[in-house]
């Protein structure tokens, strides 16, 4: 398994950047997810690593081998596509064996390796079936098997679960992760689904507008987003963000609410605030504590049951909405007034000008 | 606004029975969601209500009036489609005005203007009125579609997966907005979706359809807490409910292929059954009654999904926040006893 | 551990194969330039006959037949003059008399320079007008009928729909030449021989099958939801068709119009058999432009050029639709 290094890799279409100069190291055996909305450059990045797309500048290395201008077939990678790309006139076995036959392996060796990988993916009973009569999940299993059977230097996956129904997606998500744990293969995985990214990635690289916004573990990007984009993009719904004016330990929020900034944050805010004194308060929906003594006033806009919990949508006096995740026993009529507080451990602050997070030591992310 | 009654509706396409003897009532002002997988017959039901599809048997009744022979135009319903229902050759304003200009209504232009502006304000699309619909984003398009339904104040709103083509963030916010507008307007709405979260969060009542049959009708709480079949149980809730094949041994329950045993007190259950446990009811605790090994951890931020194996059974557990466990670690856990669901071997709730 | 450091064929060694390759790893600018050059070369090769025709149209009679062919020459309108007039050889006295006149138009001057007298207009302009009328009306009728029936085939469940569609298409499988004689006999009995009505009827019928198929494809691509939304909104089927389907099918209608028009415009065999004078169109008559004493190549080229222009204009006017029509399916999916 290879370590993949991207050194100032960029991609331009005409004058427009599809990917701005990007530096990234994917360690051997690591599962890295490229996450972002459509058009953010994540798929282009993956295709550049695979060689399906040429770079405009920069270099790509697999360990110490420079592969920047190598043909995809010479890079020793396996690519899993969203739409399976199985050959419909071949059985599952022939599909899986195809890359091995291309390499001229002996017949017994091919059979052995196909059987091994089929056992791993639990598709042995499907080997003589053609893709057309397989379910979406099984088709993607066969496609994965075809990628796995080669034991390449790296796996590149472009939204492999995107075409599956929700029920399959959850199962396959766990299966791919489990496979990765067993095989420990370097994997670059592209998705626009933040839940998938959080569940699967050792490291998540969040991209937007052709640039990396943050790279970190799931916990890092969830609890300490480095800017407003990441704060909104991760989590469903994303982080609640309210802009207010800071002065001596309190924040005046639009519509008249006053928020008392936790002591630990005061120094950091005073060090790094812009002259206007404006700052953005951020907190996750689960950080909301509903209580009659709560300092913040709101009115219930909607409340919905999500199964194991409820989500309250609270309208603040300036008619912006705050989402609050609460126990399912909470239920309020629309229009009811409601007071709440925010768990002081869970608050974060952002600079409204740079849109970057303010760190506890006063620096910016 | 009206109430809608479907009586024994059957609809066949050639040999295929799309709807099999479906009867249901939607109350005046109710938000009714039809939930089911692809091909369940949800959209067909909606189209039968709208009159776009004719039932082979049964009756469609609005208030006390039979609609069986009424043309779509005469039923006074508004239909919001999944996609493609905005006319690309017209501006947003003309799209919104289109239903009011129909020969049936012939609304004066001054009133049209008033009503279009009102609806646009409600949906926050007034800045888009002059734009051609081809230049709208997905979310804006769907807002306009909903606006075209609102502008008419019809007897019934019929919505066919209006949010499913939008990205996740947009879907979340439109979902809340739509629910708020419906509650404020008190409009009778039939909403079709395959997304269980949409159903749970928006509905006053949910009707679960599968292969043309109505399996269960109830409030979101009913559906989630008392699913009538294993199919319904698996349809709602993420991650999916743990379903475990179980054998009764006198009063105790032995979960197959594992050494998980629930103690006495189950004498009146059948010998063979399925046990359902929602992942949030599986709790990791130090002095838990059961033991297992962690095989996978999925940290989603707000919660973490932990896969626990015992024997050949894997149970999923969701735990709030970040969890300090590792793959391969042995753990102990409990299940909340009064939240266990029992199903017979055919999947019917006991 | 990388592929480079492992012996090939060793157990568990990576196997190098080609994954699906959409773009090879060569620098894209070079490829773009090469592609452009190749496209220009191909376009030039394709256009050689047209360019040659245009050149010949402006050549004098000796230049037009000279071997090896001349590429550089002084343009003349001789060919056009021959195309538009009927002439005869003039006597010496007549030439002298003509030379005295000061009111000669350009055609008469050209004729005179070749020792000929203009004795009247040729039939070419009238034949061109026939072509325009017959093409225009037959295209109009075939597209109109085709839109209606394509819509019906696309949207309604019609008993035996597939068979009917095949039946319509099967008309297209018949080589036209085979039926010219029967139609000729039929038309003579019906009194449709050498009439505009006869030709319009024939071309309409011939274009219809193709037009129905083409338009059905386009209408199939228009989501039903559009009309259904209108139906629910209180419009009748016909109103929905007019207000919603027609504007959306504009691309398809434009493409079908061009194809139908070009067929009628270029049609040769039927025109030759079924018309003689009154309703004769341009295609069968152009090759028959005989000068005095030999084939007038310049005149034939001039006729062909004049004949080409309306088709070019039509295609140019509708080019945006035509291009979109060709890439229709591809764009929809995006």
Image (cartoon, rainbow, N blue to C red):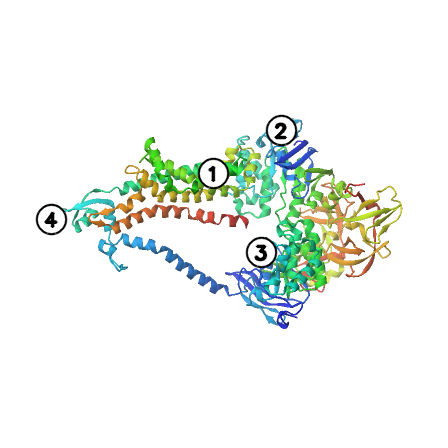
Residue topped by disc 2: B68
Residue topped by disc 4: C92
Q: Does label 3 lie on the same chain as label 4?
A: no
Residue C167 position in % (x across, y down): 47, 38
Report the Cα–Cα distance between label 4 and label 3: 82 Å
Residue topped by disc 1: C167
Question: In screen coordinates, is B89 left or right of A305?
Answer: left
Q: Is residue A327 above or below residue C199?
A: below
User: Can I make out residue A253 in this image?
Assistant: no
Report the Cα–Cα distance between label 3 and label 2: 48 Å
Q: Chain of mark 3?
A: A
Q: Chain of mark 4?
A: C
Question: Circle 1 — which element?
Answer: helix
Are the residues at dot 4 and dot 2 in contact (C-beta closer than 8 Å)? no
Q: Chain of mark 1?
A: C
Report the Cα–Cα distance between label 1 and label 3: 47 Å
Report the Cα–Cα distance between label 4 and label 1: 66 Å
Of labels 4 and 1, earlier in sequence is 4
Residue A195 position in % (x across, y down): 69, 54
Q: Which mark is residue A39?
A: 3
Question: Circle 3 — which element?
Answer: loop
At 85% from the left and 42% from the top, the residue drawn is: B269
Foreground: disc 4 or disc 1: 1
**Label 4 CA crowd tier, 10 Å (few <14, some 14–19, many 20+):** few
Q: Which mark is residue B79?
A: none
């Amino acid at each position: 398994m290879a370590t993949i290094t991207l050194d100032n890799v960029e991609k331009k279409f005409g004058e427009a950047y599809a990917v701005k100069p990007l530096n990234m190291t994917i360690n051997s055996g690591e599962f890295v997810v490229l996450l972002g909305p459509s058009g953010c450059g994540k798929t282009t990045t993956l295709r550049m690593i695979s060689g399906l797309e040429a770079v405009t500048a920069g270099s790509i290395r697999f360990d110490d081998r420079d592969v920047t201008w190598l043909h995809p077939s010479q890079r020793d990678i396996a690519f899993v596509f969203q739409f399976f790309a199985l050959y419909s006139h071949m059985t599952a076995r022939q599909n899986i064996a195809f890359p091995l036959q291309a390499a001229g392996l002996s017949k017994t060796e091919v059979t052995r390796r196909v059987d091994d990988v089929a056992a791993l993916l639990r598709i042995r009973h499907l080997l003589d079936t053609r893709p057309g009569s397989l379910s979406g999940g099984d088709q993607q299993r066969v496609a994965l098997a075809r990628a796995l059977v080669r034991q390449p230097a790296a796996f590149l996956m472009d939204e492999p679960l995107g075409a599956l129904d929700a029920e399959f997606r959850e199962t396959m998500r766990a299966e791919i992760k489990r496979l990765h744990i067993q095989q420990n293969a370097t994997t670059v995985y592209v998705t626009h689904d933040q839940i998938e990214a959080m569940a699967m990635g050792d490291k998540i690289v969040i991209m937007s507008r052709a640039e990396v916004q943050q790279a970190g573990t799931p916990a890092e990007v969830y609890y300490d987003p480095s800017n407003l984009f990441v704060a909104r993009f991760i989590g469903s719904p994303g982080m609640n963000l309210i802009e207010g004016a800071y002065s001596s330990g309190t924040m005046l929020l639009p519509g008249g609410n006053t928020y008392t900034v936790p002591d630990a944050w005061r120094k950091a805010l005073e060090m790094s605030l812009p002259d206007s004194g404006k700052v953005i308060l951020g907190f996750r929906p689960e950080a909301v504590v509903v209580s009659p003594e709560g300092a913040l006033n709101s009115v219930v806009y909607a409340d919905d049951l999500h199964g194991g919990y409820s989500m309250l949508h609270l309208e603040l006096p300036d008619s912006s909405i705050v989402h609050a995740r609460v126990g399912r026993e909470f239920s309020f009529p629309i229009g009811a007034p409601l007071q709440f507080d925010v768990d002081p451990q869970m608050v974060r602050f952002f600079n409204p000008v740079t849109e970057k997070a303010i760190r506890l030591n006063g620096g910016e992310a | 606004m009206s109430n809608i009654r479907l009586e024994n509706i059957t609809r066949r396409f050639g040999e295929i029975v799309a709807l099999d003897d479906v009867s249901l009532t939607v109350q005046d002002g109710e938000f009714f969601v039809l939930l089911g997988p692809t091909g369940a017959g949800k959209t067909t039901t909606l189209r039968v209500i709208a009159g776009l599809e004719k039932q082979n048997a049964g009756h469609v009744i609005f208030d006390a009036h039979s609609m069986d022979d009424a043309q779509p135009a005469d039923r006074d319903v508004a239909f919001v489609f999944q996609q493609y229902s905005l006319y690309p050759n017209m501006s947003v304003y003309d799209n919104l005005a289109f239903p009011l200009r129909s020969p049936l209504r012939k609304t004066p232009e001054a009133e049209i203007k008033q009503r279009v502006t009102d609806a646009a304000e409600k949906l926050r699309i007034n800045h888009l009125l002059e734009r051609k619909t081809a230049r709208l984003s997905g979310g804006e398009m769907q807002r306009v579609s909903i606006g075209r339904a609102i502008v008419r104040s019809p007897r019934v709103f019929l919505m066919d997966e209006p949010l499913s083509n939008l990205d996740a963030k947009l879907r979340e916010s439109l979902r809340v907005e739509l629910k708020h507008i419906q509650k404020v307007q008190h409009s009778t709405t039939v909403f079709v979706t395959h997304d269980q979260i949409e159903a749970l969060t928006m509905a006053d009542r949910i009707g679960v359809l599968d292969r043309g049959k109505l399996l269960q009708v109830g409030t979101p709480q009913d559906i989630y807490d008392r699913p009538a079949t294993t199919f319904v149980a698996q349809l709602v809730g993420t991650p999916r409910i743990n379903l475990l094949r179980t054998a009764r041994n006198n009063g105790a329950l032995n979960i197959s292929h594992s050494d998980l045993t629930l103690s006495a007190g189950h004498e009146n259950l059948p010998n063979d059954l399925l046990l359902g446990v929602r992942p949030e009811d599986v709790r990791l605790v130090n002095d838990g009654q059961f033991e297992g090994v962690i095989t996978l951890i999925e940290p989603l931020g707000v919660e973490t999904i932990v896969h626990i194996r015992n024997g050949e059974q894997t149970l999923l557990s969701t735990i709030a926040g970040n969890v300090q466990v590792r793959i391969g670690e042995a753990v102990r856990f409990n299940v909340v006893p009064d939240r266990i669901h029992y199903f017979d071997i055919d999947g019917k709730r006991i | 551990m990388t592929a480079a450091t492992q012996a090939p064929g060793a157990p568990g060694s990576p196997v190098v194969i080609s994954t699906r390759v959409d773009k090879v790893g060569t620098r894209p600018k070079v490829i773009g330039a090469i592609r452009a050059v190749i496209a220009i070369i191909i376009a030039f090769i394709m256009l050689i006959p047209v360019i040659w025709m245009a050149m010949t149209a402006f050549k004098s009679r000796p230049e037009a037949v000279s071997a090896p062919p001349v590429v550089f020459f002084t343009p003349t309108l001789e060919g056009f003059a021959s195309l538009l007039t009927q002439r005869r050889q003039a006597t010496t006295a007549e030439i002298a008399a003509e030379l005295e006149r000061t009111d000669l138009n350009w055609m008469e001057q050209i004729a005179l320079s070749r020792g000929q007298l203009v004795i009247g207009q040729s039939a070419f302009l009238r034949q061109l007008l026939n072509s325009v009328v017959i093409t225009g009306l037959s295209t109009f009728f075939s597209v109109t009928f085709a839109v209606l029936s394509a819509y019906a085939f696309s949207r309604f469940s019609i008993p035996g729909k597939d068979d009917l569609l095949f039946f319509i298409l099967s008309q297209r499988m018949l080589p036209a030449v085979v039926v010219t004689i029967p139609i000729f006999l039929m038309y003579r009995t019906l009194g449709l021989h050498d009439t505009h009505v006869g030709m319009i009827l024939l071309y309409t019928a011939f274009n219809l099958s193709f037009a129905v198929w083409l338009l059905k494809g386009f209408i199939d691509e228009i989501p039903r939801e559009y009309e259904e939304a209108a139906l629910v909104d209180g419009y009748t089927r016909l109103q929905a068709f007019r207000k919603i389907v027609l504007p959306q099918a504009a691309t398809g209608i434009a493409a079908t119009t061009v194809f139908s028009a070009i067929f009628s415009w270029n049609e040769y065999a039927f025109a030759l058999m079924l018309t003689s004078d009154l309703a004769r169109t341009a295609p069968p008559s152009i090759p028959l432009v005989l000068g005095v004493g030999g084939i007038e190549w310049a005149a034939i080229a001039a006729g062909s050029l004049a004949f080409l222009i309306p088709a070019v204009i039509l295609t140019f006017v509708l080019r945006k639709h035509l291009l979109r029509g060709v890439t229709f399916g591809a764009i929809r999916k995006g």
